[in-house]
Image (tube, rainbow, N blue to C red):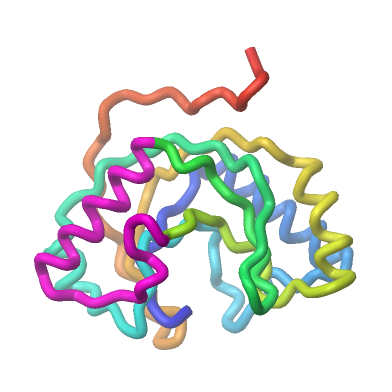
């Protein structure tokens, strides 16, 4: 990933995910905690691009309607070893993604095709290089914490390669409760 619009979890969930990163590292699974510059935070990326100029992106987006409630409820993997936790694609999360894409398109700001509506897979990356036995060790640790009810409460334009982080404005979304995992009271 070169540049992204990242959504961040509420502090208690961020701590829980960092605890999972620690457990994965102890099991020999490399995580974002120790990837590249070691400043990654648990997040969900709305879009990723080769470059996202922070000021034009912020101007195009305006305030984002947050918080957005989600439930991390499954483990997934993309080719190349990217291991992740997946939030259920709720109407609120999909609406935020769609609005973000529409505003970036209107402003002529390009991003990777994998982050287009109907292609985008919402995910919270755990590892960029989990393969083979590492996946076998990681999946049970992930299932030990799932499901995780959460809220995405803040956002930023980040470019980890260049060391840039530009927080985005947030406007309160309509009052939402964090959803209850399926099968829970």
> What is the x, y in percent for residue 69?
44, 35
Residue 32 in view of the camera:
no
Q: Which residues are magenta?
A: 91-119
Compared to 63, does 137 lie above or below?
below
User: Looking at the image, which residue sits at the far top?
Assistant: 185
User: Looking at the image, which residue sits at the far front?
Assistant: 118
Residue at point 24%, 77% (across, down): 110
33 left or right, relative to 98: right
> What is the x, y in percent for residue 85?
63, 52
Compared to 25, does 151 lie above or below?
above
> What is the x, y in percent for residue 9?
49, 47
Q: Is residue 9 magenta?
A: no
138 left or right, relative to 103: right
Q: How many marks are shown on the rendered structure?
A: 0
Quadrant of residue 155 in the image? bottom left
Compared to 10, does 165 lie above or below?
below
Residue 43 in view of the camera:
yes
């Amino acid at each position: 990933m070169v540049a992204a619009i990242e959504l961040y979890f509420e502090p208690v969930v961020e701590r829980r995910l960092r605890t999972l990163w620690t457990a994965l590292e102890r099991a020999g699974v490399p995580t974002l905690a120790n990837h590249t510059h070691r400043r990654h935070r648990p997040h969900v990326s709305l879009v990723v691009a080769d470059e996202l100029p922070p000021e034009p992106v912020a101007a195009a987006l305006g305030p984002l309607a947050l918080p957005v409630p989600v439930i991390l409820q499954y483990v997934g993997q993309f080719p190349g070893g990217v291991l992740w936790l997946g939030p259920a694609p709720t109407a609120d999360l999909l609406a935020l993604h769609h609005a973000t894409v529409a505003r970036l398109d209107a402003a002529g700001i390009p991003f990777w095709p994998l982050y287009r509506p109907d292609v985008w897979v919402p995910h919270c990356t755990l590892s960029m290089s989990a393969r083979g036995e590492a996946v076998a060790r990681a999946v049970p640790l992930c299932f030990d914490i799932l499901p995780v009810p959460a809220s995405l409460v803040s956002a930023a334009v980040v470019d980890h390669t260049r060391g840039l982080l530009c927080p985005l404005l947030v406007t309160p979304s309509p009052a939402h409760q964090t959803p209850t995992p399926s099968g829970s009271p």
